[in-house]
Image (tube, grey):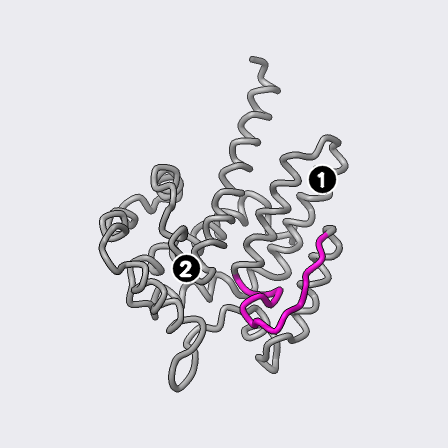
């Protein structure tokens, strides 16, 4: 194997790891169903180790098969992100954190929607507020989509297009609110499940700045 081919293989493996990580976080921060807990813990363990977080994943592996654990996770998701009295602790929408008004479907939501369209995606608006374009899970899934397209692109121009889209979306959107959001989830949650993945998300996005650059250079 030549040095060049080894380098390309290394880049592809890194990109595949990034795609897995974005899809994993998107799945975790979507309302949990049974398949949410059916995670590939072997791969997750490798990723946690690479990010220096290997010690934090051990506890939830044992809890994962506990009777009634799915209901616990669903209740905690609802409490944190959907409905709680007197207010929802952590609405998972960019506009709440980055727009002056702090409302759903704000200016930043429309900017996110524009990013999706520029990348060739159409987002169907519904009455379900959990499918708003700037929901954390949707933004993370979008980054996985861009990275997947970069990986599968044939021409260098196409690869560059999707890499630049990742850089700009990370800089203009995710980095403006997701690290702080994950930090607050760590502090607010009562479950190790969300505490661990919130920390994973925060550290992963920090690593993404090094991988992609924050767009300022």
Question: Residue 204 at x, y = what percent?
Answer: 46, 49
Is 33 or 60 nearer to us in this picture?
A: 33
- Which of discs 1 and 2 lies nearer the camera? The answer is 2
Q: Say which residue label 2 marks.
A: 32
Residue 20 versus residue 215 in the image, above or below: above
What's the magenta bit mostly, secondary-structure-wise?
Answer: loop
Of the numbered discs 1 and 2, the one sitting upstream in the chain is 2
Q: How many marks?
A: 2
- At x 29%, y 67%, the residue is 190
Question: Residue 183 at x, y = what percent?
Answer: 40, 64
Magenta-span inclusion, residue 125: yes
Q: Say which residue label 1 marks.
A: 160
- At x 49%, y 38%, the residue is 17
Screen quadrant of the N terminus: top right
Magenta-span inclusion, residue 26: no
Residue 205 versus residue 7 in the image, above or below: below
Q: Quadrant of residue 202?
A: bottom left
Q: Is residue 200 left or right of residue 131?
A: left
In space, the residues marked 1 and 2 are separated at their CA atoms by 35 Å
Q: Determine the secondary structure under disc 2.
A: loop
Q: Which residues are magenta?
A: 121-136
Question: Residue 69 at x, y = what percent?
Answer: 27, 59
Q: Is residue 55 left or right of residue 12?
A: left
């Amino acid at each position: 194997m030549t040095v060049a081919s080894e380098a390309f293989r290394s880049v592809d493996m890194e990109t595949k790891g990034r795609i897995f990580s974005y899809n994993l976080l998107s799945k975790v921060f979507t309302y949990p169903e049974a398949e949410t807990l059916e995670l590939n813990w072997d791969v997750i363990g490798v990723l946690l180790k690479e990010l220096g977080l290997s010690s934090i994943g051990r506890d939830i592996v044992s809890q994962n098969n506990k009777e009634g654990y799915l209901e616990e996770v669903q209740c905690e998701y609802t409490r944190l992100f959907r409905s709680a009295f007197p207010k929802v602790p952590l609405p998972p929408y960019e506009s709440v954190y980055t727009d002056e008004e702090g409302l759903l479907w704000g200016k930043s939501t429309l900017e996110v929607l524009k990013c999706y369209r520029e990348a060739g995606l159409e987002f169907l608006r519904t009455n379900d507020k959990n499918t708003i374009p700037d929901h954390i899970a949707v933004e993370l899934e979008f980054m996985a989509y861009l990275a997947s397209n970069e990986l599968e692109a044939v021409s260098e121009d196409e690869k560059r297009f999707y890499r630049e889209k990742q850089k700009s979306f990370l800089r203009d959107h995710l980095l403006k609110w997701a690290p702080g959001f994950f930090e607050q989830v760590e502090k607010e949650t009562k479950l190790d499940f969300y505490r661990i993945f919130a920390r994973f998300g925060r550290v992963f996005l920090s690593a993404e700045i090094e991988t992609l650059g924050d767009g300022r250079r």
